[in-house]
């Protein structure tokens, strides 16, 4: 797929996401730039196998994630013969990952193996989870597994790179740098 085609599809999906929230899309310069950067990454055959969308709250990261999910899932449905991609992009909230690590380990292990996974709001979850005195780090475990298996992973976060390194450690931050293209949403909140 060309960058142009990816941009057209992403703009359409982004508009649908905004309208599903009973808002009207305003294609201002920051939104155009963000869509263009994500479309370029999605259309490229780069060495990285993930995408991190970071920035402050309310500036379109979650909308972009759901728009990307729409585009990828539609493209997968068109090519139904490719069963390696499963159902398409699955989105899971980082807080839910932390709960699964504590209470639903099998569910977490299933999510770890999803071919296409997006983690929403990484950084809002507790880093450690305790069960019967055993400490675990579910989001770290998930990210490390996906790094090792080179599975496509998308992340949205309000954290910057320095804060990610402080919360998850240098080892995970270094792996994220290797596996993910990073798009920083620098615009202000669209919420009224």
Image (cartoon, rainbow, N blue to C red):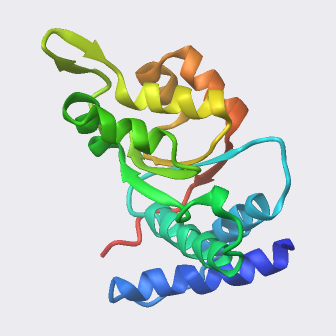
- Image quadrant in which the C terminus is located: bottom left
In-front residue for pair 85/6: 85
Horizontal side, residue 36 vs residue 47: left or right: left
Q: Is residue 162 visible?
A: no
Residue 189 position, x and y percent, is 41, 65
- Residue 171, located in which quarter of the rendered image? top right
Q: Residue at x 84, y 58 (%)?
A: 44
The outermost residue toward the left is: 132
Residue 82 position, x and y percent, is 70, 65
Q: Residue at x 84, y 73 (%)?
A: 1
Horizontal side, residue 70 vs residue 8: left or right: left
- Residue 19, located in which quarter of the rendered image? bottom left
Q: Residue at x 32, y 42 (%)?
A: 107
Horizontal side, residue 6 vs residue 175: left or right: right
Q: Is residue 6 visible?
A: yes
Q: Residue at x 48, y 69 (%)?
A: 66
- Residue 14, located in which quarter of the rendered image? bottom right
When the figure is inspected, residue 63 is found, relative to residue 118, above or below; the finding is below
Residue 47 position, x and y percent, is 83, 41
When the figure is inspected, residue 99 is found, relative to residue 6, above or below; the finding is above
When the figure is inspected, residue 158 is found, relative to residue 177, above or below; the finding is below
In-front residue for pair 110/19: 110
In-front residue for pair 133/28: 133
């Amino acid at each position: 797929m060309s960058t142009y085609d990816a941009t057209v599809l992403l703009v359409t999906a982004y508009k649908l996401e905004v309208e599903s929230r009973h808002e009207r899309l305003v294609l201002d310069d920051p939104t155009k730039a963000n869509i263009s950067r994500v479309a370029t990454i999605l259309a490229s055959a780069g060495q990285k196998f993930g995408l991190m969308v970071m920035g402050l709250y309310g500036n379109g990261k979650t909308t972009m994630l759901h728009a990307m999910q729409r585009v990828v899932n539609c493209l997968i449905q068109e090519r139904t013969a490719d069963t390696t991609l499963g159902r398409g992009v699955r989105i899971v909230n980082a807080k839910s990952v932390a709960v699964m690590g504590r209470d639903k380990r099998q569910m977490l292990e299933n999510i770890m193996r999803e071919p296409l996974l997006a983690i929403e709001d990484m950084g809002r979850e507790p880093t450690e989870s305790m069960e019967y005195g055993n400490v675990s780090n579910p989001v770290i475990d998930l990210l490390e597994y996906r790094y090792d298996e080179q599975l496509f992973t998308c992340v949205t976060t309000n954290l910057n790179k320095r804060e990610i390194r402080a919360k998850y450690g240098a080892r995970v931050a270094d792996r994220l740098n290797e596996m993910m293209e990073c798009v920083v949403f620098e615009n202000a909140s669209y919420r009224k």
